[in-house]
Image: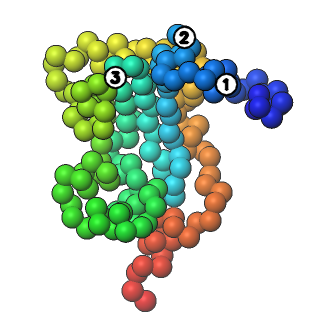
């Protein structure tokens, strides 16, 4: 918005990073920018009732922590609707046909919490969330993330997670779970 010369709406909590883009430096440019928050709620219509996959994450220089609020749901959409949150090309077809470790890492259900050590595991494959050696780190990251999200007014952190279920999917419904059931049944 800064590049376009527009004034952001008061409800936007993000900060411009134009100064970083124009700095000509690489790596950590601004010493106060040492953390990133990520949030996901509703993206694809590939689950019953267009349910989303609510998750929040925090990325520091050392760790990546993810909290999956509905780990019983498929993060890329349900298998029977073709994992609608993924491009359906040859790579997707190859991985989903194997049901191996790559399938699990790419499309499988995720645990409620995930913790990865970036320096040793940049691909985020080895989940340390259940390792007792990392319990303190996990708890500190969760608390820091939730505090920051509360400060930003995240409805999920303020006890209003149900708000997201009131938002209807407005795109084409051709891949919706309900249409899959409707048109995939023998006549």
Rendering coords of residue 52 (x, y %) = 48, 47
Rendering coords of residue 33 (x, y %) = 53, 16
Q: Which residue lies at the image location 56% right of the left edge and 21% below the top edge?
A: 25
Lower position in the chain sequence, tag 3 or tag 2: 2
User: Spatial distance from mark 3 to mark 1, Cα to Cα?
Assistant: 27 Å
Lower position in the chain sequence, tag 2 or tag 1: 1
User: Spatial distance from mark 2 to mark 1, Cα to Cα?
Assistant: 17 Å
Rendering coords of residue 62 (x, y %) = 34, 19
Residue topped by disc 2: 32
Q: Which residue lies at the image location 40% right of the left edge and 53% below the top edge?
A: 76
Q: Is residue 31 visible?
A: yes
Residue topped by disc 3: 63
Q: Which residue lies at the image location 19% right of the left edge and 52% below the top edge?
A: 101
Left or right of 8? Residue 161 is: left
Task: Look at the numbered disc 3 and give the secondary structure of its residue.
Answer: strand
Residue topped by disc 1: 22
Lower position in the chain sequence, tag 3 or tag 1: 1
Q: Residues within 10 Å of mark 3 (few under 14, many from 20)?
A: many
Q: Residues within 10 Å of mark 1 (few under 14, many from 20)?
A: few
Left or right of 132? Residue 145 is: right
* Residue extending farthest left: 132
User: Spatial distance from mark 3 to mark 2, Cα to Cα?
Assistant: 17 Å
Q: Which residue lies at the image location 57% right of the left edge and 26% below the top edge?
A: 154
Disc 3 and disc 2 in contact, CB within 8 angstroms: no
Disc 2 and disc 1 in contact, CB within 8 angstroms: no
Q: Quadrant of residue 136?
A: top left
Note whether 68 is above or below 63 in the view shown.
below
Q: Is residue 17 visible?
A: no
Q: Nearer the viewer, residue 7 or 39?
A: 7
Task: Look at the numbered disc 2 and give the secondary structure of its residue.
Answer: loop
Note whether 141 is above or below 48 in the view shown.
above
Closer to the observer: label 3 or label 1? 1
């Amino acid at each position: 918005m800064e590049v376009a010369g527009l004034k952001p709406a008061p409800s936007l909590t993000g900060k411009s990073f134009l100064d970083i883009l124009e700095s000509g430096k690489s790596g950590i440019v601004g010493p106060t920018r040492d953390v990133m928050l990520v949030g996901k709620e509703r993206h694809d219509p590939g689950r019953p009732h267009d349910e989303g996959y609510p998750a929040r994450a925090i990325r520091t220089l050392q760790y990546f922590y993810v909290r999956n609020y509905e780990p019983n749901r498929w993060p890329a959409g349900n298998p029977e609707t073709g994992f609608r949150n993924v491009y359906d090309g040859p790579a997707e077809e190859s991985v989903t046909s194997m049901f191996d470790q790559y399938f699990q890492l790419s499309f499988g259900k995720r645990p409620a919490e995930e913790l990865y050590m970036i320096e040793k595991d940049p691909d985020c494959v080895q989940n340390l969330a259940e390792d007792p050696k990392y319990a303190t780190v996990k708890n500190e990251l969760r608390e820091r993330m939730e505090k920051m999200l509360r400060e930003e007014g995240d409805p999920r952190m303020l006890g209003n997670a149900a708000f997201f279920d009131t938002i209807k999917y407005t795109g084409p419904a051709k891949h919706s779970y309900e249409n899959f059931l409707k048109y995939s049944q023998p006549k």
